[in-house]
Image (spheres, grey):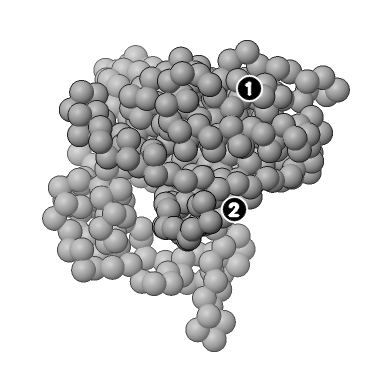
Amino acid sequence: MAITDVVVPQLSESVSEATLLEWKKQPGEAVEMDEILIEVETDKVVLEVPAPAAGVLKEIVKGDGATVVAGEVLARIDTEGKATAAAAPAAQAPAAEAAPAAAAAAPAPAAAAITSPAAGKILAEKGVDPATVEGSGRGGRITKGDALAADAGAKKPAAPVAPPSLSLDGRPEQRVPMSRLRARVAERLLQSQQENAILTTFNEVNMQAVIDLRKKYKDHFEKEHGVKLGFMSFFVKAAVAALKKYPIVNASVDGKDIIYHGYFDIGIAVGSPRGLVVPILRNADQMSIADIEKTIADFGARARDGKLGLEELTGGTFSISNGGVFGSMLSTPIINPPQSAILGIHATKDRAVVENGQIVIRPMNYLALSYDHRIIDGREAVLALVAIKEALEDPQRLLLDV
């Protein structure tokens, strides 16, 4: 018998532990080399743990929900073994924590449907309850094919009640533990509110010039670069131009020191099924419009699939949050520590404005710049936002660096 250990992958220096999600194989099942066995959730990303060798999963050492650290043994593979006729789920190690006592006293719920990650994503997009789908995989597992063929009309109940839960006079409540990512986001936002002297300044920008430029070149742009020309690249370029003029807005606080960054790493806030993440555009000042659009599109796709790497979520000197994609008119974004400022952009809407004494209709966007007043004075914050506004209203400025 030759045994190979499955271990927790290396985590970043800022991540000390992680949580196991759901095992995709059970003891006794055959595994292929590099086949994904389980996902490990940290407070930043979800990492996939592949099989280091082909063989049979002999033992699961750490069960679903267990808290683990880098290098810890999760399971063992017998590289010379043969798969049994049926897997042995009972051999799986217990989860890290038992359900609350209140849940233990409740009637046992029906067994949860087991789905592959791809099938689960498809069912979620179609709004189909996995419990209504008959799986054709081993042990009733729902495969991708099952999900594609599932009836989209079989919706999940509007208010599911899953253990641990309470139901008082038809008013259900459900207690669900925060994911590591959600808990970390909550911690960092609270830290930002407590440690930064946050103020927000506002301005409005006429997006007509950007809209006209995009309309004129979007087809040529997509044909040339293989990606659609959006608006975020213009905001990134405008922000970088403003940060060059007012370096304090790109700085950060370290104790009683101010660190001025000679580079421009722009964080782009992206919503994902697991929560808010902020991947970083490294050296954004050196990126073309096409590079920015391609990278942001890639960030969005991989954020939805939980495929962003730890290194892509670390650092950053300034952030941009786009609430406009959800229809937000105005907001006061919270600074992403240790950064000292963040730009909030919103939905562009036709609004009545006054130009040369005349009321005209223009596509307006309200901008919000939240900043740490400990190191950034109102003057620099306001002027930086005005510089962003001027760059967007006259995009040629970005080419001439004026």
Question: In this image, 119 relative to 396: left or right?
Answer: left
Q: Which of marks 2 and 1 is nearer the N terminus?
A: 1
Asked if 99 appears above or below 319 in the picture, the reply is: below
Q: Which residue is drawn at 35% across and 29% down?
A: 293
- Kind of residue at disc 1: Lys
Q: Name the residue under label 1.
A: 245
Outermost residue toward the right in this view? 256
Q: Measured from the top left, where is residue 334 in percent x and y?
A: 65, 44
Q: How crowded is mark 2: few (under 14 residues within 10 Å), some or many (20 or more)?
A: many
Quarter of the view holding residue 27? top left
Location of the N terminus by quadrant is: top left
- Kind of residue at disc 2: Ser
Task: Report whether residue 49 is seen.
Answer: no
Q: Which residue is drawn at 61% across and 37% down?
A: 385
Q: Mark 2 points at which residue?
A: 331
The Cα atoms of the two marked residues, 2 and 1, are separated by 25 Å
